[in-house]
Amino acid sequence: MKLRILNPKDTIFSGDVKSVFVQGDRGEFEILDYHAPIVSLLRKGEITVDGKTRFPVKKGIVKFFKDECLVLLD
């Protein structure tokens, strides 16, 4: 799937990945290829990409639709 992680000033990450693990506002969850469409707020924590790369999160939002994951961070 394609993943883009953006903040107001820059693109933090853009590329093809196999999994994205996030701290949603109602709990942790992992997004894999062909996940059901979802939109969720993000709480403070980390985004883990492919089980190894981590990005810190204060707050944000994640959207997954048609094999594309978009994360907007504050």
Image (spheres, rainbow, N blue to C red):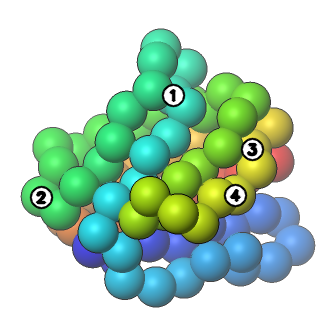
Q: Which amino acid does label 3 sit on?
A: Val
From mark 4 to mark 3, how far is it between C-alphas?
Answer: 7 Å
Under mark 4, the amino acid is: Phe
Neighbour tally class for label 2: few under 14, some 14-19, many 20 plus, Cα within 10 Å = few
Give the secondary structure at mark 1.
strand
Query: Are the two marked residues, 4 and 2, in contact with CB atoms closer than 8 angstroms?
Result: no
Q: Which residue lies furthest to the front in this view?
A: 52
Residue carrying label 4 = 55
Residue pictured at 72% horizontal, 75% vertical: 12
Residue 15 spot, x, y in % from top left: 46, 85
The residue to which callout 3 is attached is 57
Q: How far apart are marks 1 and 3 (CA)?
A: 11 Å
Marks 4 & 3, CB-CB < 8 Å contact: yes
Instruction: Return the x and y of residue 5 as percentages of the image width and height.
Output: 61, 67
Per the image, label 3 sits on a secondary structure element best described as strand
Q: Quick one: label 2 or label 3, which is nearer the N terminus?
A: 2
- What element does badge 2 sit on? loop
Expressed as whole percent of the image width and height from the top left, the position of residue 53 reads 59, 66
Which image quarter: residue 9? bottom right
Is residue 6 shown left or right of residue 71? right
The numbered mark at residue 34 is 2
The front one of 36 and 20 is 20
Q: Which of the two discs, 1 and 3, labels the residue nearer the N terminus?
A: 1
Q: Residue furthest right?
A: 9
Mark pair 4, 2: CA separation: 23 Å
Give the Cα distance between marks 2 and 1: 19 Å
Residue at 55% of width from left, 20% of height from top?
A: 25
Q: Which numbered dot is residue 24?
A: 1
The furthest residue to the bottom:
15
| CB-based contact (under 8 Å), mark 1 and mark 3 | no
